[in-house]
Image (cartoon, rainbow, N blue to C red):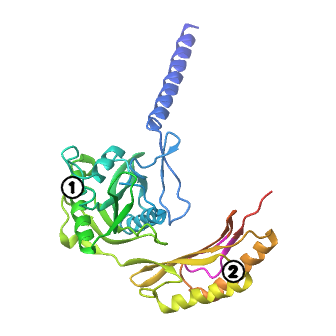
């Protein structure tokens, strides 16, 4: 009987030890609370969740001043992702929004260099005399999984540079503007990138990873399109050689264009034919415009906005179907195209076609 009691106690103790071991194992695996979002589309990166929340950038949205052209922000972020994909493929890397440059640091770097701010990357001097070049920056971290832990294997830094410097001579006074020379924008951008690279290399975790820099020229505040990236570099050392920089021929245009310079005549004619046809359907349309995206002088994508008055549901359904027919007939093939139909009441329908597809996906918004 005593032997049975001893055997029972040994077995019971073993169960407790295993249970404790399992609890400790589960605790350690989730102690950091970090998870990776499953990839549902090869065009997109897997993201990172920490403690049940998406891990947002520590510096995203920080800029020298309020950016009046929101298209600059969208073009900057989307374009930066496109450049990152060329160096860090979505199938091999996980995207973690910037965690190594915090908000306070970015604010200091975007400021003017001065006694109080020796880390400032914008030129020292008075606002009325010396322009600000660096407007915004973004950090993207690229990770791989190693023994259930994420390790940084690469980084992309985007630098948004002003093409026009806006300033006031007195608080709340009139806004003045100064057009900046392209040669000065390029020089300032490359010098700032080199400075940032040297600072990042001081972090042990970032000492030996490839760091990509991309320079973005922002569009004026009143532009109907965003800016464009004009140079990039991949760096494994602590300084950027001039030979590391690669020129990027990326341009965005508004259609109908005031000037056809840079826009392919066939692309312009295709859009004009599409526009004329749908205006016949609803002659009182408020506007039909497009953003045309060119890379190396080749049309790579188009976003079209159609602004209507508020129409009945059956009219919108018919109009959307007609837009689809005209888009398939007149707009360029083999490029991604998004078409948004909206009114003062909000978006009424949208159409989308991916590269290589013949037909558009359409959706008409309804209400219950």
Which region is colored magenta? 350-362
Residue 296 % position (x, y):
38, 82
> Could you tell me which residue is drawn at 33 percent across and 57 percent down?
155
Residue identified by numbered label 2? 323
Q: Which mark is on residue 312?
A: none
Q: Nearer the viewer, residue 4 or 267?
A: 267
Q: In which quadrant of the rendered view does residue 3 lie? A: top right
Q: CA distance from mark 2 to mark 1?
A: 54 Å
**Does the rendering let one see residue 156?**
no
**Secondary structure beneath label 1:** loop
Q: Quadrant of residue 228?
A: bottom left
Q: Is residue 352 magenta?
A: yes
Considering the numbered disc 2 on the image, is that residue within a helix, a strand or a loop? helix
Mark 2: few/some/many CA within 10 Å (<14, 14-19, 20+): many
Image quadrant holding the C terminus, namely: bottom right
Asked if residue 184 is among those painted magenta in the image, a careful observer would answer no
């Amino acid at each position: 009987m005593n032997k049975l009691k001893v055997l029972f106690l040994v077995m019971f103790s073993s169960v407790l030890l295993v249970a404790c071991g399992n609890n400790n194992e589960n605790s350690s695996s989730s102690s950091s609370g970090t998870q990776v979002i499953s990839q549902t589309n090869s065009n997109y990166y897997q993201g990172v969740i920490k403690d049940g929340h998406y891990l947002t950038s520590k510096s995203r949205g920080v800029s020298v001043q309020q950016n009046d052209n929101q298209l600059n922000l969208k073009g900057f972020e989307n374009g930066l992702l496109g450049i990152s994909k060329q160096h860090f493929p979505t199938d091999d890397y996980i995207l973690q929004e910037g965690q190594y440059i915090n908000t306070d640091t970015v604010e200091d770097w975007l400021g003017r260099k001065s006694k109080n701010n020796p880390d400032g990357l914008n030129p020292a001097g008075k606002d009325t005399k010396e322009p600000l070049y660096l407007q915004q920056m973004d950090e993207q971290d690229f990770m791989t999984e190693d023994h259930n832990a994420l390790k940084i294997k690469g980084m992309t830094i985007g630098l948004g540079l002003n093409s026009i410097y806006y300033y006031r001579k007195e608080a709340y006074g009139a806004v003045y503007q100064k057009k900046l020379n392209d040669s000065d924008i390029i020089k300032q951008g490359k010098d700032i990138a080199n400075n940032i690279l040297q600072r990042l290399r001081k972090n042990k975790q970032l000492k030996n990873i490839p760091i990509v820099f991309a320079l973005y020229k922002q569009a004026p505040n009143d532009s109907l399109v965003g800016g464009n990236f004009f140079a990039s570099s991949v760096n494994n050392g602590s300084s950027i050689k001039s030979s590391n920089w690669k020129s990027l021929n990326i341009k965005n245009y508004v259609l109908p264009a005031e000037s056809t310079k840079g826009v392919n005549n066939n692309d312009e004619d295709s859009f004009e034919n599409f526009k004329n046809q749908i205006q016949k359907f609803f002659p009182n349309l408020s506007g039909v415009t497009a953003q045309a995206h060119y890379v190396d002088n080749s049309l790579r994508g188009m976003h079209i906005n159609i602004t209507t008055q508020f129409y009945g549901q059956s009219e919108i359904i018919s109009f959307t179907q007609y837009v689809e027919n005209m888009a398939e007939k007149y707009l360029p093939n083999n490029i991604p195209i998004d078409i948004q139909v909206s009114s003062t009441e909000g978006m009424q329908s949208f159409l989308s076609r991916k590269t290589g597809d013949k037909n558009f996906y359409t959706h008409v918004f309804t209400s219950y």
